[in-house]
Image: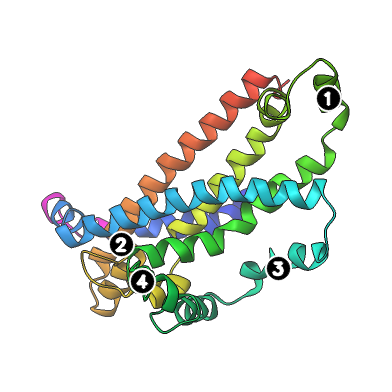
């Protein structure tokens, strides 16, 4: 009872209020708000960049976790501590730092944009960079404990039977890590979808180009269009729920295939 009460106060009641506020709009008005070209452009950027950032973090987060668990190298403890920096760093500070770094006159931007012609700051690529930055720790900290508990005797047995390192990883190690990797992917994706502070500084916030959905919700709130803001929030909530449900379904299927649900 206490658990359900706490869950209702913290999660269910606020989410219900969003749906209730949206009912102030008629069906036609709701559809017009959530399918406006500017709003649709923000959906594409927000969800597309979030999925891509989560996929990149899944790959490199696995590599980073693997290096921290399986290898010893100078500065290992420092690297391990730096992984948690996006957790502790205020998002606005992260956005300003990334902007200063990747702007045309920044330390990296002067080479990437000035020499190579690749614009990072104040564009969609800047959004992707910010989302990768804030999502990486979720994958590393989810996969790392599983790697630490993984029995290396399984890999040694595969190697003794003639399996190559890639074959050992593909058929022995990866099936064990996959559920945790999918969980880290889902956490990174969920974090990226709702990110605001670190993105608005580096994105440039150009309508139809680099404007994210949370920003247009804030814009409507500043214009006192509460019903319009909640309508867009409802669409984000439903789409996020569907994607996370799909990811959880994949995780459950993976557990069933690998026998980890027994």
**Residue of label 3:** 82
Task: Give yes or no for residue 27 being in the magenta stretch.
Answer: yes
Indicate the position of residue 160 as horizontal and vertical percent values.
Answer: 85, 19
Please report the residue visible at 81 percent of the width from the left and 45 percent of the height from the top.
70
Q: CA distance from mark 4 to mark 3?
A: 24 Å
The reply to whether dot 1 and dot 3 touch (C-beta < 8 Å) is: no
Indicate whether 15 appears above or below 82: above
Q: Which residues are magenta?
A: 22-29
The reply to whether dot 4 and dot 3 touch (C-beta < 8 Å) is: no
Is residue 35 shown left or right of residue 161? left
The reply to whether dot 1 and dot 4 touch (C-beta < 8 Å) is: no
Q: 10 Å neighbourhood of mark 1: few (<14), some, or many (≥20)?
A: few
Does dot 4 land on a helix, a strand or a loop?
helix
Q: CA distance from mark 1 to mark 4?
A: 46 Å
Q: CA distance from mark 2 to mark 4?
A: 23 Å
- Of labels 2 and 4, earlier in sequence is 4
Name which quarter of the figure residue 99 lies in: bottom left
**Residue of label 1:** 154
Q: In the displayed image of the protein, which residue is found farthest to the top?
A: 161
Q: How is the image coloured?
A: rainbow
Which quarter of the image is occupied by the C terminus? top right
The reply to whether dot 2 and dot 4 touch (C-beta < 8 Å) is: no
Indicate the position of residue 6 as horizontal and vertical percent values.
Answer: 62, 56
- Of labels 1 and 3, earlier in sequence is 3
**Residue of label 4:** 203
Indicate the position of residue 77 as horizontal and vertical percent values.
Answer: 82, 64
Is residue 235 shown left or right of residue 154? left
- Of labels 2 and 3, earlier in sequence is 3
Q: Nearer the viewer, mark 2 or mark 1?
A: 1
Q: 10 Å neighbourhood of mark 4: few (<14), some, or many (≥20)?
A: many
Does dot 2 land on a helix, a strand or a loop?
helix
């Amino acid at each position: 009872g206490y658990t359900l009460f706490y869950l209702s106060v913290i999660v269910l009641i606020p989410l219900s209020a969003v749906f209730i506020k949206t009912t102030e709009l008629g069906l036609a008005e709701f559809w017009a708000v959530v399918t406006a070209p500017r709003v649709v452009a923000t959906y594409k950027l927000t969800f597309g960049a979030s999925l891509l950032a989560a996929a990149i973090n899944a790959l490199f987060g696995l590599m980073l976790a693997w290096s921290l668990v399986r290898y010893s190298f100078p500065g290992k403890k420092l690297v391990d501590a730096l992984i948690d920096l996006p957790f502790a760093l205020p998002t606005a500070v992260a956005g300003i730092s990334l902007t200063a770094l990747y702007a045309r006159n920044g330390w990296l931007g002067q080479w990437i944009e000035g020499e190579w012609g690749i614009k990072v700051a104040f564009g969609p690529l800047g959004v992707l960079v910010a989302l990768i930055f804030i999502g990486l720790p979720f994958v590393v900290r989810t996969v790392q404990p599983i790697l630490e508990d993984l029995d290396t005797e399984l890999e040694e047995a595969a190697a003794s039977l003639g399996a190559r390192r890639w074959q050992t990883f593909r058929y022995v190690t990866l099936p064990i890590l996959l559920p945790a990797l999918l969980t880290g992917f889902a956490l990174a994706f969920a974090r990226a979808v709702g990110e605001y502070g670190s993105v608005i500084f580096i994105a440039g916030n150009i309508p139809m180009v680099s404007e994210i959905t949370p920003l247009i919700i804030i814009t409507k709130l500043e214009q006192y269009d509460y019903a319009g803001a909640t309508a867009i929030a409802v669409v984000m909530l439903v789409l996020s729920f569907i994607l996370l449900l799909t990811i959880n379904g994949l995780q459950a299927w993976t557990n069933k295939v690998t026998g980890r649900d027994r």
